[in-house]
Image (cartoon, rainbow, N blue to C red):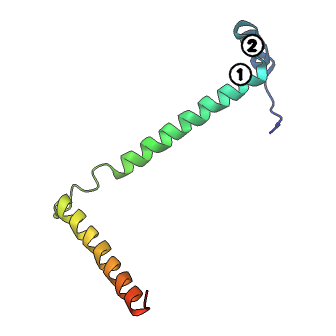
């Protein structure tokens, strides 16, 4: 996608210098800069999400394995109900 951006004369000058040194177009350098900015944003966003959930289990009394087994037991109950419906439907 094409887009227009306003850059200062100094930014354009430095981009031109970088383009010559790296043998790339200014557009390629701008795309790389945007990609780096996006990558940084995603990393900070992911870190914030991890920080938000870190230690979420610390105040729980229930053992983690017991919790997992209880949740999986719910799946077994659902499977049994589905199986009973299929039998009742004659399949």
Which quadrant does the C terminus fall into? bottom left
Relative side of 50 to 19, left or right: left
Label 1: which secondary element: helix
Residue 16 location, x and y as percent? 78, 13
In the image, is residue 69 above or below residue 55?
A: below
**Residue at image location 56% in from the left, 34% down from the top:** 39
Q: Are marks 2 and 1 in contact (CB under 8 Å)?
A: yes
- Counting residues from the N terminus, which is met first, the one under dot 2 or under dot 1? 2
Gap in angstroms between the C-alphas marked 2 and 1:
7 Å
Mark 1 residue crowding within 10 angstroms, few (<14) / some (14–19) / many (20+): some
Residue at 66% x, 31% y is 34
Residue 87: horizontal and vertical position, in percent? 38, 88
- Residue 7: x and y, percent? 79, 26
Q: Which mark is residue 29?
A: 1
Labelled disc at residue 69: none
Can you say whether 64 is above or below 44 in the image? below
User: Count of labels shown?
Assistant: 2
Quarter-of-image position of residue 26: top right
What residue would you read off at disc 2? Answer: 19
The extreme front residue here reads 91
Q: Quadrant of the N terminus?
A: top right
């Amino acid at each position: 996608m094409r887009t227009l951006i306003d850059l200062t004369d100094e930014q354009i000058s430095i981009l031109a210098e970088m383009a010559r040194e790296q043998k790339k177009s200014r557009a390629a350098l701008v795309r790389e800069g945007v990609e780096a900015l996006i990558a940084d944003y995603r990393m900070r966003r992911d870190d914030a999400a991890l920080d938000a959930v870190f230690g979420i289990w610390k105040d729980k009394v229930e053992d983690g394995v017991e919790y997992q087994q209880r949740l999986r037991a719910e799946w077994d109950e659902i499977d049994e109900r589905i199986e009973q419906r299929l039998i009742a439907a004659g399949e």
